[in-house]
């Protein structure tokens, strides 16, 4: 009556969508310059250097294309660029040796613990 496989009239049937929070704490962290500090001081091999350079060049070209896009709002551009930055960090991490990955992971955990401790020490806003 209402179409093949439909048991309710269109007016009653509802579409369930996954709701995403407007603020994602992890997303803001990717824009944090302290994340670059997690990767500093590592001795990269020539292969790693070239792989990281390719990743960076690819990401920069994607970011430039998004920045030029006229169909996106400023907030949308910021969100997409932030996503590209996060993906770049992930690909850079995968290009590291297992020893370097452990070192970066421990730096990240220490930074997060310090951020969390600083956040809990702040007095509540009135």
Image (cartoon, helix red, strand yellow):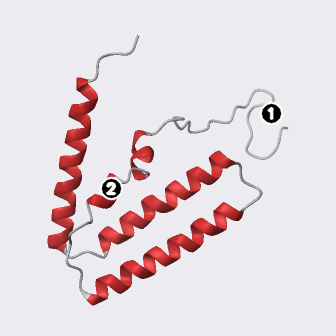
Image position, residue 121 (x, y; %): 23, 24
Q: Is residue 69 above or below residue 43?
A: above
Q: Residue at x 62, y 68 (%)?
A: 64
- CA–CA distance in space, label 2 to label 1: 49 Å
Q: Residue furthest bottom?
A: 46
Label 1, secondary structure: give it: loop
Label 2, secondary structure: give it: helix
Residue with the mark numbered 2: 35
- Quadrant in the picture for residue 77: bottom right
Image position, residue 83 (x, y; %): 50, 57
Q: Residue at x 28, y 23 (%)?
A: 122
The numbered dot on residue 90 is: none
Q: Is residue 14 above or below residue 101?
A: above
First along the sequence among labels 2 and 1: 1
Please indicate whether residue 90 sits to the left or right of residue 45 in the image.
Answer: right
Residue with the mark numbered 1: 10
Q: Residue at x 21, y 62 (%)?
A: 104
- Quadrant in the picture for residue 69: bottom right
Image position, residue 3 (x, y; %): 82, 43
Image quadrant occupied by the C terminus: top left
Count residues near mark 2 (Cα–Cα under 10 Å), then give few for <14, some for 14-19, many for 20+: some
């Amino acid at each position: 009556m209402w179409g093949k496989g439909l048991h309710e009239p269109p007016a009653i049937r509802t579409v369930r969508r996954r709701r995403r929070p407007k603020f994602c704490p992890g997303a803001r962290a990717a824009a944090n310059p302290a994340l670059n500090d997690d990767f500093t001081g590592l001795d990269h091999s020539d292969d790693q250097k070239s792989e990281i350079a390719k990743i960076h060049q690819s990401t920069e070209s994607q970011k430039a294309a998004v920045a030029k896009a006229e169909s996106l709002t400023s907030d949308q551009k910021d969100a997409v660029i932030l996503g590209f930055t996060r993906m770049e960090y992930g690909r850079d991490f995968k290009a590291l040796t297992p020893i370097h990955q452990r070192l970066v992971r421990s730096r990240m955990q220490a930074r997060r613990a310090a951020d969390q401790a600083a956040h809990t020490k702040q007095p509540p806003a009135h």
